[in-house]
Image: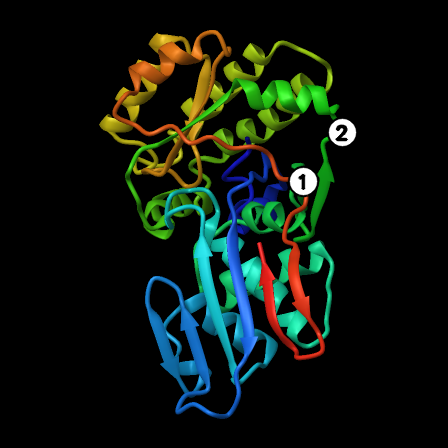
């Protein structure tokens, strides 16, 4: 909840807040030092492989930006694999940036806080790469857990964990359903209209309401209200968010959503900027088989919550190599 208020174009004037959670779908990044035995100085492996000698020759924008930000000029290789497809609204790009900064700093013996990791990732994405991104994904990936993020007019970000019991968190998870629409998109293309309308104040009322819903959502989770009430808030949030831009939804997505609601889902929303990606729904566990049958053409994705955030999985300091993060 609160997505849209985490863009500087809004919160630097009005403040903002979001309620979100990290889940157990990961970006795995391995950074190794590279001996002077090859005819290249930098190897970057993701869906393709790049072999270059200069940082500015790297085509992958986040790898190039992170190395430039930290002043690393070569003699290393970066390998990436992910649990989820890119450009689907689940923060995979920010997860990559946070994890890569974490790994690169560790190669130099620097272990930094989650706050610093998130702040650096925001700087790289917004300032060095010029991407139209908010700031909630970077902080959620860095910290993990169920978070209340507050964005001040002065530009600071405060990450507050939501103190609910393990039983209550499990109850929330049992009511959540995640479906993949199969539609990938570039978030900056979806966001162009929304950012323009944010800047000129056209959607200030809607964004203010989305921020208010964060407080209501936290109240539901912390004070034991029925999960159906949380679903109703998500539904209200989705209806409001669709007013921010004509690109947030489309007839196919609207149809899937209405079918799910007709089958028993209380509420839900598209995750991320909109336009495709993953559809999150809230439904009573008893109603979930019917909801899943109604969306038989969409694969359901099981998930749990992650509490750790960006983590060092393996570290070999003696050789200054073989670093892995998720």
Q: Secondary structure at mark 1?
A: loop
In percent of width and height, residue 242 lies at 38, 29
Residue 163's label in the rendered image is 2
Determine the CA span between mark 1 and mark 2. 12 Å
The tag on residue 250 is: none
Question: Badge 1 is on which residue?
Answer: 307
Q: Where is residue 150 drawn, in percent x and y? A: 67, 41
| Res. 110 in view | yes
Crowd band around label 1 with a 10 angstrom C-alpha radius: few (<14), some (14–19), many (20+):
some
Categorize mark 2 by other alpha carbons within 10 Å: few (<14), some (14-19), many (20+): few
Q: Quadrant of residue 291?
A: top left
Q: Earlier in the sequence, mark 1 or mark 2?
A: 2
Quadrant housing the N terminus: top right
Q: Position of residue 118 (x, y in %)?
A: 63, 56
Chosen colour scheme:
rainbow
Q: Is residue 278 left or right of residue 99?
A: left
Total number of numbered discs in the rendering:
2
Foreground residue among 67 and 275: 67
Name the residue: 59% across, 36% down: 21
Q: Which residue is depicted at the point 36% across and 38% down?
A: 277
Residue 122 visible at all: no
- Residue at x-position 71% and y-position 74%: 317
Indicate the position of residue 28 as horizontal and vertical percent values: 52, 56
- Residue 162 in the figure: left or right of residue 281: right
The secondary structure type at the circle numbered 2 is: loop
Residue drawn 67% across the image and 40% down it: 307
């Amino acid at each position: 909840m609160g997505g849209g208020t985490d863009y500087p174009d809004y919160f630097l004037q009005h403040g903002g807040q979001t309620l979100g959670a990290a889940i157990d779908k990961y970006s795995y990044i391995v950074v190794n030092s590279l001996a002077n035995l090859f005819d290249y100085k930098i190897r970057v492996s993701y869906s393709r492989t790049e072999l270059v000698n200069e940082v500015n020759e790297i085509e992958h924008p986040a790898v190039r930006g992170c190395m430039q930000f930290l002043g690393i000029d070569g003699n290393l290789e970066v390998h990436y694999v992910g649990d989820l497809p890119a450009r689907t609204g689940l923060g995979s790009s920010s997860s990559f940036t946070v994890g890569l900064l974490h790994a690169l700093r560790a190669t130099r013996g620097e272990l930094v806080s989650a706050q610093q990791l998130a702040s650096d990732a925001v700087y790289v994405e917004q300032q060095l790469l010029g991407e139209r991104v908010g700031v909630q994904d970077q902080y959620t990936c860095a910290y993990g857990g169920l978070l209340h993020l507050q964005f001040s007019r002065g530009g600071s970000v405060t990450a507050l964990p939501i103190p609910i019991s393990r039983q209550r968190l499990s109850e929330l998870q049992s009511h959540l359903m995640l479906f993949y629409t199969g539609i990938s998109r570039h978030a900056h293309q979806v966001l162009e209209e929304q950012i323009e309308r944010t800047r000129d104040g056209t959607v200030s009322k809607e964004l203010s309401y989305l921020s208010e819903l964060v407080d209501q959502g936290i109240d539901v989770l912390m004070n034991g209200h029925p999960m159906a009430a949380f679903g109703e808030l998500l539904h209200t949030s989705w209806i409001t968010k669709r007013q921010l831009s004509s690109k947030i939804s489309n007839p196919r997505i609207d149809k899937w959503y209405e079918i799910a609601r007709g089958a028993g889902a209380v509420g839900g929303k598209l995750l991320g900027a909109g336009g495709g990606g993953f559809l999150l729904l809230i439904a009573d566990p008893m109603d979930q088989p019917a909801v899943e049958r109604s969306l038989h053409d969409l694969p359901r994705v099981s998930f749990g919550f992650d509490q750790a955030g960006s983590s060092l999985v393996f570290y070999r300091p003696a050789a200054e190599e073989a670093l892995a993060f998720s």
